[in-house]
Amino acid sequence: MLQFFTGAPVFDGECIREDIGVAVDDGVVLALRSADEIPEGAHVVRLDPSAVLAPGFLDLQINGAGGVLFNAEPTADTAIHIAKSVRCHGVTRILPTLITDCKETLASACQTIGEAAEDEMSGVLGIHVEGPFISVERKGIHKPSYIRVPEEEDLVRLAELSLALRQNGARLLLTIAPENVPDDAIARFAQSGVVVSAGHTAASYERIHEAIANGVTGFTHLGNAMPAIQNREPGPVAAALASRDTWCGLIVDGHHIHPGLMKVMLAAKPEGKVFLVTDAMPPVGTDMQSFELYGQTIHRSGGRLVSSQGVLAGADIDMANAVRNCTTLLDLPLSEALRMASLYPAGHLGLDNRFGRIAPGYTADFALITKDVEPLETFVAGRSVWKRSEV
């Protein structure tokens, strides 16, 4: 069906354009044209003139939302529920994230995620497997008894999953600690199309660069579950900042990383290499005050999610708030904050030719937001999938 979105300024991924309409055909952007040049036969979608039509947000690290946790039941239905739960925050595509768990849970997630990724309208863009191949020393909330090195079975399973997901334009993102995964394993993952990221790691500066040479292309929640930079042992954070070609995920909630350090990170990396993640958990989008993880209660308190021992367990933030925090905490222009939530994560996955812009040939995933980044309506492949109630 031919559609024409008109009435609101359009952020096309580069700048905000006035008096522009967006022609969409069969879920793909056909053209941007003058707002009064309505294509013949098009269904006109009238937008709030006080809002901005922006590319839909991508969240590459989301453990749960809407009251559910992907680890608790790693099925296609759970992944789709999480994706639907964050549409009210302008998010159109996610990688449901499986944190360190037993072999059976990992196998179950790998077996079921393809079903969700096959459906373009699901919003599920693959899977993020965060562990179990990480550092016990830098485990964070991850359960240490599940942490291990990859075995041949893991290499085969994840390679096959990556290849299968790529056939549907989806991705497998894998977080590892390079000190616990040999170079040949990293290379095998990368060769099969796995997007390999370093996280929950205490690896040396030198080891990180060895891992990058073998296929690591990113860093998971930079600065968290990593040692602090020291003058003679700069470690993974400094290695990430010194590497010009790698991407870094960042949790901009004001709790995980001090805003001053985040400004330094942004100044150090080339433009386009830092993207937003939420690391969200089940309470996001609900009034839940606690949830269960690994048999322990995680409490919601003061904008944080913490165990009884005070260990951070994911984050209590949605993507719209993360974008807003970029403008208020980090003094970034709205255009850059929007790119950090859309174009840049798409770039990390190698999908920035499909997502992150409103341009011909791109999927018509849109977030209609106020200039204060309050979502009003969300569109997946041109279809309205959530709209704020007028009440």
Image (cartoon, rainbow, N blue to C red):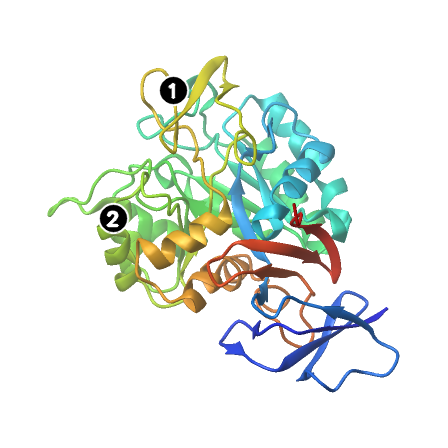
Per the image, the residue denoted by label 2 is 205
At x 53% / y 71%, what residue is drawn? 13
Between 290 and 94, the residue placed more toward the observer is 290
Residue density around tag 2, few if under 14, some if 14–19, many if 20 or more, within 10 Å: some
Residue 217 in sight: no
User: Element under label 1?
Assistant: loop
Kind of residue at disc 2:
Tyr
Task: Give the label, 1 or 2, closer to the camera.
Answer: 1
Q: Position of residue 29 (x, y in %)?
A: 71, 72
Numbered circle sitting on residue 307: 1
Residue drawn at (50%, 44%), measured in percent from left and top? Answer: 318
The residue shown at (73%, 47%) is 122
**Residue 144 placement (x, y as % from top left):** 41, 20
Q: Identify which residue, 242 or 91, lies in the foreground.
A: 91
The amino acid on which the numbered mark 1 sits, given as a three-letter code, is: Ser
Q: Quadrant of residue 301?
A: top left
